[in-house]
Amino acid sequence: MELYQKTAHELSGLLAKKEISARELTENVLAQIQKKDSELGAFITVTGERALETAQKVDELRAKGEKLGALAGIPLAVKDNICTEGIPTTCASKMLADFIPPYSATVMEKLSLLPLVGKANLDEFAMGSSTQSSAFHPTRNPHDPKRVPGGSSGGPAAAVASGEAIMALGTDTGGSIRQPAAFCGVVGLKPTYGRVSRFGAVAFASSLDQVGPIARDVEDAALLLEAIAGPDALDGTVSSKAVPDFRASLKSGVRGMKIGLPKEYLALELAPAVQEKLAQAREHLEAQGAQCVEVSLPRSQYAAAVYHLIASAEASSNLARFDGVRYGHRAENCPDTLTMYLQSRSEGFGPEVKLRIMLGTYALSADAYADFYQKAQKVRRLIADDFAHSFSQCDCLLLPTTSGLPPLLGQELEPRESYTADLCTVSANLAGLPALSLPSGMSEEGLPVGLQLVGNHFQEETLLKVAWTLEQCFGQVEVK
Amino acid sequence: MVITPEKTKQLAQLARLALFGDEAAEFAEQLSGILTYTQQIQSLNTEGTEPMIYPRATKTIMRDDVVVPSLSQEQALANAPQMQDGMFRVPRIIEEE
């Protein structure tokens, strides 16, 4: 087995015992990027030299006998909407094609001893679910390059699935970590709103966005979450709650736990492979001593509508900062400032971003505010109330991550299909809940299937424990 | 729910976006589709329900008002499309007499 195919916790052990060096490991991963990325397109910027410098530093510190964190020396990919000092951060947009942040996101400061191998591709400004709206190039699914890797964190998920990175950071506003994780056969975790600092993560929808891990297995996800979680003086939305040792209870089993199966999600039109894996998961959990109970989330069918209104409204406000003055694209030869704003934004943003900005502008306009934006906020509360009620009956929920398998590149979804495609993932963002997508084996066509666990606020430990138990049944997906 | 191309142009102007060619008609059709889909929430009874602005109850976190290091002028200007004399340069704002 090549080094790039191993998990971070295995590699961490090899590094600690000095059986391998961080430099050797980083070179192995960079060679895999060299070999695979012209086909997959997981990266926008590869930062090989910088990665090797960090690896060298880790090896030197280790040689001196310094006590290092478990993930020191593990090659990392980072979604290109997370700021990295001195390294371009483009959000896959022409608007930020030349932007080089003068500071790093808090999560990057926390991971400074992980060799950063590159900035990974995404849908422009994280708006999409296929990584095809990147202004630079699409990313392909490592399990079938004719298919999409999902999105918007398609680059990070494809990188981890193909050995172009050992682990990665993504962002999740409506499923952007979990859906690509499901499509690429890796673990994706959206933490509780307020668990991880977002300072330096380019804002899309501020009441929904979270940064989180994409990893080979559940234990790796636990390690990476622990490394990035916790309070930050630069982000007032982060909770001061103590960060637990997420690995401590990982393997303690599910005996006596109650797993809720939300009937509205199970009644969706699901691909046969998804249905089959759900049944298998349920059987395994029951065999391990958990009890599966039916629960109801009666307002869940409205989640996609609420999400599109709220996310677009917040995006229209957040993206107003791109005005061609302080950073980002500026159109040439503008006679006045209004022309500068209009031209710079029209040239800099792609069609999906423009559509969402206009949708948000409409939802926030005087005519529509009460019926659309405020109404969506009220229904958002009802959706959150449904979850709160379900957690009085169970410890966590089990549902699909996606109703189907990864579509072909360029395949247009019917508009209605595309609005509802996010139905399984968006509700956790609306309610601020932690949610994890777990690889659950392959379909007959050889495509990964993902199942999702949703927990109560700050109950990531519960999710990780149940996911670890299920992982013993489904196993890991082979690194392609 | 129909958003006309004229309404779309008005929204674009508010959002500081210029539309070219058939864009107003294309965006109008897409906006109409999405807004029609979202109208399903209007039939739900939300009387007495408070709008949910953040997913968790939060309180404002205060910090001490002390000076800490921040970006230098050079760093702050490093990404500016145009600058002059240590400032962001923009087109003329005030018309000549």
Image (cartoon, helix red, strand yellow):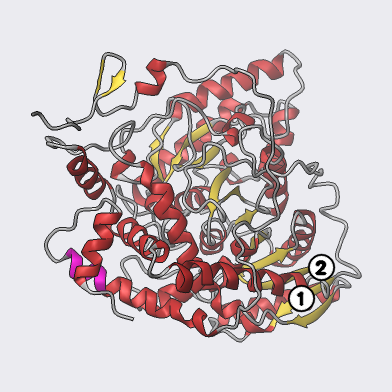
Q: Position of residue A355 (x, y in %)?
A: 32, 62
Q: Is residue A6 left or right of residue A341?
A: right
In the displayed structure image, the side of residue A436 where residue B21 appears, left or right = left
Q: Is residue A266 above or below residue A237?
A: below
Q: Amino acid at mark 1?
A: Gly
Q: Which residue is outermost to the right?
A: A256
- Quarter of the view holding residue A436: bottom right
Q: Is residue A458 magenta?
A: no
Q: Which quadrant: the N terminus of chain B?
A: bottom left
Q: Which residue is mark 1?
A: A260
Mark 1: few/some/many CA within 10 Å (<14, 14-19, 20+): many
At a point 76% along the width and 41% down the height, the residue shown is A240
Question: Image check: A434 left or right of A174?
Answer: right
Label 2 neighbourhood size at 10 Å, few (<14), some (14-19), many (20+)?
A: some
Q: CA distance from mark 2 to mark 1?
A: 7 Å
* Res. A218 in view: yes
Q: Report the residue at 50% width, 48% height from top.
A: A156
Chain letter of disc 2 in the image:
A
Residue bounds of the magenta highlight: B23-28
Q: Residue at 28% across / 37% down in the picture? A: A324
Residue located 65% across and 45% down the image: A7
Q: What residue did someone put label 2 on?
A: A395
In this rendered view, identify the residue nearer to me: A454 or A283: A454
> Mark 1 belongs to which subunit?
A
Tell me which secondary structure the magenta stretch mostly adopts. Answer: helix
For the residues bearing labels 2 and 1, Cβ distance under 8 angstroms? yes
SS at mark 1 in the image? strand
Q: Residue furthest front?
A: B97
Q: Position of residue A170 (x, y in %)?
A: 54, 48
